[in-house]
Image (tube, rainbow, N blue to C red):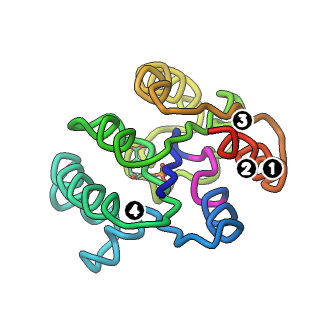
């Protein structure tokens, strides 16, 4: 079984994914990290050298590879479900969960954490909220195709884990 966590940048996919994998005794894979290991470079460098399109091709190949594994909790990048037919691929080969974090919380988290994220690194602090609002609105249509949605407000990682386990048990 594979569980795929999707959601916008800063929604806690990796933090939640790690603890979920540990609880289930599954392997944890962060797709960005998997790509960085495979190509021995950083996501920012791939964007810089090959543009977003180059990155999306590598991301698609990595996603296809990881979805063939067994007993994995997979955290994908915020943009992964948007390209090719990645969302269908994810839904056909795993149980997908959208971690839906409200806009103000996302802005707060990303304000101090945008430098290593090529899509928002160049955006001024004052313009970040508007950018994220628009971007999230577009992406939500695809995120909502996940098998499950978990709305997250101020819960701790352990609270989120509990709710995820309930949701997966009732699957
Ligand atoms: C991206 C999100 C990033 C990373 C890349 C593009 C996006 O991952 O894949 O910078 O398009 O939203 P995180 O969601 O883990 O930050």
Is disc 4 surrounded by few (<14), some (14 to 19) or many (20+) residues within 10 Å?
A: some
Cβ–Cβ below 8 Å for labels 3 and 2?
no
Percent from the top left, x then y, of residue 104? 70, 29
Name the residue beneath numbered marker 2.
Answer: 165
Which mark is first along the chain, 1 or 3?
A: 3
Percent from the top left, x then y, of residue 87? 34, 36
Determine which quarter of the picture holds residue 59. Answer: bottom left
Is disc 2 surrounded by few (<14), some (14 to 19) or many (20+) residues within 10 Å?
A: some
Q: Nearer the viewer, residue 5 or 126?
A: 5
Q: CA distance from mark 3 to mark 2?
A: 23 Å
Percent from the top left, x then y, of residue 70? 42, 66
Range covered by the magenta-colored residues: 10-15
Q: Nearer the viewer, residue 111 or 152?
A: 152
Is disc 3 surrounded by few (<14), some (14 to 19) or many (20+) residues within 10 Å?
A: some
Name the residue beneath numbered marker 3.
Answer: 105
Q: Is residue 50 left or right of residue 36?
A: left
Determine which quarter of the picture holds residue 139. Answer: top left
């Amino acid at each position: 079984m594979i569980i795929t966590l999707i959601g916008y940048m800063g929604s806690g996919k990796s933090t939640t994914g790690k603890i979920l994998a540990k609880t289930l005794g599954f392997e944890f894979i962060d797709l960005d990290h998997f790509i960085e290991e495979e190509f021995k470079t950083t996501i920012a460098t791939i964007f810089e050298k090959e543009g977003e399109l180059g990155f999306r091709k590598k991301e698609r190949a990595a996603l296809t590879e990881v979805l063939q594994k067994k007993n994995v909790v997979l955290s994908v990048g915020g943009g992964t479900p948007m390209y090719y037919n990645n969302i269908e691929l994810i839904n056909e080969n795993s149980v997908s969960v959208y971690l839906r974090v409200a806009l103000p919380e996302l802005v707060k988290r990303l304000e101090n954490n945008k430098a290593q994220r090529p899509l928002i690194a160049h955006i001024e602090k004052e313009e970040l909220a508007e950018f994220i609002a628009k971007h999230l609105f577009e992406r939500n249509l695809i995120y909502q195709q996940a098998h499950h949605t978990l709305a997250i407000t101020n819960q701790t990682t352990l609270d989120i884990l509990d709710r995820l386990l309930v949701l997966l048990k009732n699957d």
